[in-house]
């Protein structure tokens, strides 16, 4: 571990620390940010009387719209000349939101990324190929500073430029790569397609995040790149990547939330009421140590669960994989649907690959989803690379595979969906960043 004392701190001690830190954040926000002073006054909260973390649910939520309403600098606690760095969200769902960091914020950012890198398998002296985008997006610089703090050698290649990524993987021999899971898929496929001997690479670990992904993609990446792949989660509003991280020996059981800096809650998406451990809901974070732009109960829109894992190496709570953002949820004939649910069903589906896209259309008042999914390359070759565009020419074997997938979707999700098989390579790939798995053709009224 990078900081074993705090990563294994007993829970009562952690709560005490969280309470002290939260009270400090409230004082800072009350004094310096008019928006929060007003919110606290309205809620009848006086920082000096606040008991502690157990009363966190009394605090008001902060939404993305609050950041937009105070664009660009309205929620900062300090004058701009004291801000060390500005980042912005990648704007996946609209106008970017701007965040500022003090020197201390940058050092905490580096610290949580260093913890995350160790949990992902990284060690001082190892080399990291950092294929997260550098720039306003927090991924590139965030991983960079954390890896340097840990004592890794960083190759700051940034995202995209697949030819160059592959060259560096072969010649520089990094031990670890950081990128989005969809881009790791692209790289894995290219390694196979170009006949690169993966056993000659030195790559052992992949630290992947910035978009939702499931076990189906994990298997694909681990198989093609011969790595152990773990999840890193974060968002610029809270700090960037390194808010939570999966341990490479505890894969599949959730990601440790670095609770001494970011306090997580799960709340009901409609009522905002706190939900118990294990229940799916909206993830909400309160920063505990931020200086430049602390946020109270920030509504991430990301849907997951929280759970303490008594058998884990660390004491901090774990969060599940993100199944999606609540604003990306499709409602199809009354059933709530995230694209990760379809991806999940691709795990262990013989004959199909983990490359897919959902196409959403509207027929009168009804929304329909068509699942485009690629067939597995080996099956495709073995069957003589047939045309798949016409059921007449599609081999029986593929029709069976398709029907099996349709029934699996119907059985698990309760919806009948059209499944259209595609030849390998037909579905858009990540070219370096986040990949949209949904193509929405509905006319927006
Ligand atoms: P944007 O909202 O513009 O994409 P960010 O670049 O700050 O802004 O991305 C943060 C968001 O990315 C998170 O709120 C979440 O939706 C998604 N995200 C980040 N890491 C992960 C991850 N490991 N798994 C799923 N989603 C993730």
Image (cartoon, rainbow, N blue to C red):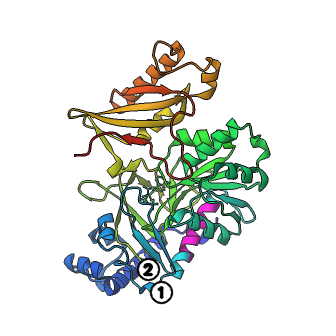
Write the residue at 33% across / 70% down.
67
Pointer 2 with pointer 1, Cβ within 8 A:
yes
Report if residue 7 is visible in the image: yes
The percent coordinates of residue 170 (x first, y second) are 76, 50
Residues packed near mark 1 inside 10 Å, few (<14), some (14 to 19) or many (20 plus): few
The percent coordinates of residue 298 (x first, y second) are 35, 66
Reading the image, the residue beneath label 2 is 292
Q: CA distance from mark 2 to mark 1?
A: 9 Å
Instruction: Point out the stretch of residues depicted in magenta.
Output: 107-118
Disc 1 element: helix
Picture quadrant where residue 73 is located? bottom left
The vertical placement of 422 against 176, above or below, is above
Question: Taken as a whole, is the magenta stretch helix, strand or loop?
Answer: helix
The percent coordinates of residue 162 (x first, y second) are 64, 49
Q: Is 400 left or right of 439, judged from the image as shown? A: right
Reading the image, the residue beneath label 1 is 82
Front-most of residues 252 and 50: 252
Nearest to N terminus: mark 2 or mark 1:
1
Image quarter where the N terminus lies is bottom right
The vertical placement of 420 against 356, above or below, is above
């Amino acid at each position: 571990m990078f900081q074993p004392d705090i990563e294994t701190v007993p829970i009562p001690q952690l709560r005490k620390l969280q309470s002290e830190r939260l009270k400090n954040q409230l004082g800072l926000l009350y004094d310096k940010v008019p928006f929060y002073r007003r919110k606290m006054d309205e809620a009848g909260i006086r920082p000096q009387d606040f008991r502690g973390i157990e009363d966190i649910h009394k605090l008001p939520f902060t939404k993305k719209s609050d950041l937009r309403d105070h664009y660009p600098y309205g929620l900062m606690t300090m004058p701009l000349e004291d801000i060390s760095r500005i980042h912005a969200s990648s704007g996946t769902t609209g106008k970017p939101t701007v965040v500022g960091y003090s020197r201390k914020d940058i050092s905490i950012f580096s610290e949580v990324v260093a913890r995350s890198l160790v949990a992902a398998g990284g060690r001082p002296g190892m080399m990291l190929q950092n294929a997260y985008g550098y720039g306003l997006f927090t991924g590139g610089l965030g991983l960079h500073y954390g890896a340097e703090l840990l004592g890794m050698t960083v190759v700051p290649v940034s995202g995209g430029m697949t030819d160059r990524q592959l060259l560096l993987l072969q010649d520089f021999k990094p031990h670890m790569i950081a990128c989005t899971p969809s881009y790791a898929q692209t790289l894995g496929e290219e390694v196979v397609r170009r006949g690169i001997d993966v056993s000659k690479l030195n790559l052992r670990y992949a630290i992947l995040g910035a978009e939702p992904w499931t076990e189906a993609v994990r298997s694909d990446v681990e198989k093609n790149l011969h790595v152990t792949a773990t999840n890193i989660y974060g968002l610029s509003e809270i700090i960037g990547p390194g808010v939570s991280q999966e341990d490479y020996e505890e894969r599949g059981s959730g990601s440790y939330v670095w609770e001494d800096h970011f306090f997580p809650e799960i709340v009901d998406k409609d009522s905002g009421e706190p939900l118990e451990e294990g229940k799916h809901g909206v993830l909400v974070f309160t920063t505990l140590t931020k200086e430049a732009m602390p946020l109270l109960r920030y509504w991430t829109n990301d849907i997951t669960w929280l759970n303490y894992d008594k058998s884990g190496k660390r004491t901090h709570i774990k969060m599940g994989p993100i199944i999606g953002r609540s604003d990306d949820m499709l409602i199809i004939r009354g059933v709530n649907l995230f694209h990760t649910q379809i991806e999940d069903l691709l795990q262990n589906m013989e004959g199909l690959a983990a490359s897919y896209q959902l196409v959403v259309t509207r027929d009168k008042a009804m929304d329909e989803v068509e699942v485009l999914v690629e067939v597995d390359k080996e099956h495709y070759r073995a069957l003589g690379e047939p045309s798949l565009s016409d059921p007449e020419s599609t081999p029986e074997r593929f029709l069976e595979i398709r029907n099996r997938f349709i029934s699996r979707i119907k059985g698990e999700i309760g919806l009948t969906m059209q499944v259209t098989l595609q030849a390998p390579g037909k579905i858009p790939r990540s070219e370096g960043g986040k990949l949209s798995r949904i193509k929405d053709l509905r006319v927006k009224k």
